[in-house]
Image: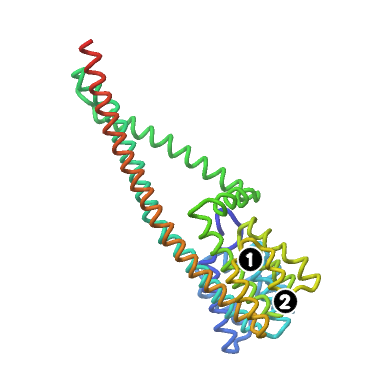
Amino acid sequence: MGIVSSEIRVKKLTPMFRQLATAYDAGIPLVQAFELLKREQKDRELSEMLTRMQETVKQGGTLGDAVSAESRKLPSYAIALIRAGEQGGKLDVMFRDLADYFEDRLEMQRQMLRWMAYPIVLLTATWFLGTFALRLVIKLPDILLSGKPLSLSEYFEEYIKFQTLAGLLFAGICVLCIVLARIGLMRWIWGLFSTHVWPLAPITKRFALARFCRSLALLVDSGLPIVQSIERAAAVTANPYIQRDLLRSVPYVKEGASLTQALSVSKYLLPTAREMIHVGEESGKLEESLRKVSRWYLDEASHAAAIATRVLYFIVYFAAAGLVLYVVYTFYSRLYGGMLDAIG
């Protein structure tokens, strides 16, 4: 379970759906497949969910009923896909598509972590080393002028107290963010920042639209009505502003407009993507075109993330250099200022 959500993390869902797809392809009944998955599970939460789903199917319920009962643990679009695949007789295809989707989404998350790891480490080191040096140089001129020896034990004790207070403040901010996320406000606050502030905005938009197109392809292929498919896929973007923008196309679809015409009202969907979707509609290969659009957006997001990472490197480097210059300036200004005061 995630900290900010009751849904099971993608990292845990990915192997589960891949194993379900493999078992279903092999002709293993669902009840037996659930039993096999439970034996291999080390995660208690996931094992308990599989047990409940197995009992529902044993008692004569459908797989759609079993996953619908786990709406707090499973993403809504995964439930919609499984229900649509079961009704359309494409459950094996849906399992494979869900496994592929979660693997792609997990890879997106890992890419973001790889890109952000070095700037975070550098910023953390800059904070601890910078505050240590800055607090030291503030005291050092007075010590040199007064002739009193510096007590390192007292200084470290004071420094640890300072970092403890800073850590408590940071922990309080994290708790506040978690509370806001639980009540649904954090997604609007963070979405406003990540959607409109460079260099995060290009990455956020492209990753969100990649998820939207991939999910829409899965939902359309499962036989779900196009309006419901758009609504479900828009929710996968995990960004309320982009979701609201994409949902503006729903009334046009209800009035009989094509998907391309309906999506033309979106200010986030790029013209290239709309043209690719139009080609898919005209050729009768909409699902394939949506997958291509998703892959294109994913490549664009990777490129934007690489640029943003370089920009962050320079920002962090300049911040560290600025802190060093400030430390040196503070030291000498206090030292010579103290000497002038002593002479005066």
Q: Nearer the viewer, residue 248 or 160?
A: 248
User: Residue 123 location in percent, x, y?
Assistant: 37, 47
Specify the quadrant that holds the N terminus. bottom right
User: Residue 310 location in percent, x, y?
Assistant: 38, 57
Specify the quadrant that holds the C terminus. top left
Q: How is the image coloured?
A: rainbow
Q: Residue at x 58, y 68 (%)?
A: 211
Asked which secondary structure carries label 2, the reply is loop
Query: In the image, is 43 to the left or to the right of 121?
Result: right
User: Residue 150 location in percent, x, y?
Assistant: 22, 26
Q: Nearer the viewer, residue 124 or 67?
A: 124
Which comes sooner in the sequence, label 2 or label 1? 1
Q: Quadrant of residue 279?
A: bottom right
User: Residue 338 location in percent, x, y?
Assistant: 25, 18
- The residue that disc 2 covers is 224
Local packing at callout 1 (Cα closer than 10 Å; few below 14, some 14-19, many 20+) is: some
Q: Quadrant of residue 6?
A: bottom right
Q: What residue type is disc 2 on? A: Leu
Asked which secondary structure carries label 1, the reply is loop
In the displayed structure, would residue 116 be above or below residue 227?
A: above
Give the numbered dot on residue 75: 1
Q: Nearer the viewer, residue 176 or 337?
A: 337
Give the numbered dot on residue 15: none
Q: What residue type is disc 1 on? A: Pro
Local packing at callout 2 (Cα closer than 10 Å; few below 14, some 14-19, many 20+) is: many
